[in-house]
Image: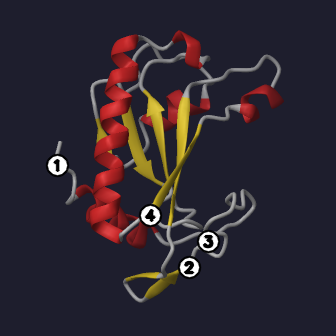
Amino acid sequence: MISAMNSVENCEICELIGDINPLVETEHWVGYVKNNQSYLGQSDFLLKRHVGDLALITDEELLDFKKLVNNTEEAMRLAFSADVFNWTCLMNNAYQENPPLPHVHWHLKPRYKSLVEVDGQTFVDEEYGYHYDESKENIVSDELVQQISDRISDKFTG
């Protein structure tokens, strides 16, 4: 089981790190495919060390993330012909709590010009070429998440 380095009590992300089925894991980051597949391959990537601000991540963590981005994007291109990748680091929800407990993590929404079919389910990116729709939901089964994750992880080269 994966564990957060320097985890902080009551941090949602620190707790999540131990409960996910990883798509990919590096020395500093772990990524997983989400059940919300409004954009095929939609995933989150979590810094294993509890850090609440991008400015506080180390150069080593940043370089590790760059390699992770390169490998993930290439794997998703090979697995599903993804065209564009939207990476966001928002952390706004952490500030709805008092006191806030932010933890650096990235959201990935791959974008597709053409429809993609996985196990009989069709994925269409209706907003292609425009900002993604944050409210859009397409909750899929754990089994389909595993299939999507397996197809991507099979294409990782580094």
The residue type indicated by label 3 comes to Asn
The residue nearer to you, when weighing 32 against 108, is 108
Mark 3 and mark 1 lie on one chain; the one further toward the N terminus is 3
Question: Residue 83's mark?
Answer: 4
The residue type indicated by label 2 comes to Val
Q: Which residue is identified by label 2? A: 124
Quick check: marks 4 and 1 in contact, CB under 8 Å? Answer: no
Bin the neighbour count of mark 2 within 10 Å (Cα to Cα): few under 14, some 14-19, many 20 and up: some
The local secondary structure at tag 3 comes to: loop
Question: Residue 138's mark?
Answer: 3
Q: Using the image, determine if residue 104 lies above or below residue 31.
A: above
Mark 2 and mark 4 lie on one chain; the one further toward the N terminus is 4
Image side of residue 68 versus residue 47, left or right: left
The local secondary structure at tag 1 comes to: loop
Mark 3 and mark 4 lie on one chain; the one further toward the N terminus is 4
Bin the neighbour count of mark 1 within 10 Å (Cα to Cα): few under 14, some 14-19, many 20 and up: few
Image side of residue 137 versus residue 31, left or right: right
**Residue at screen point 33% across, 62% down:** 77
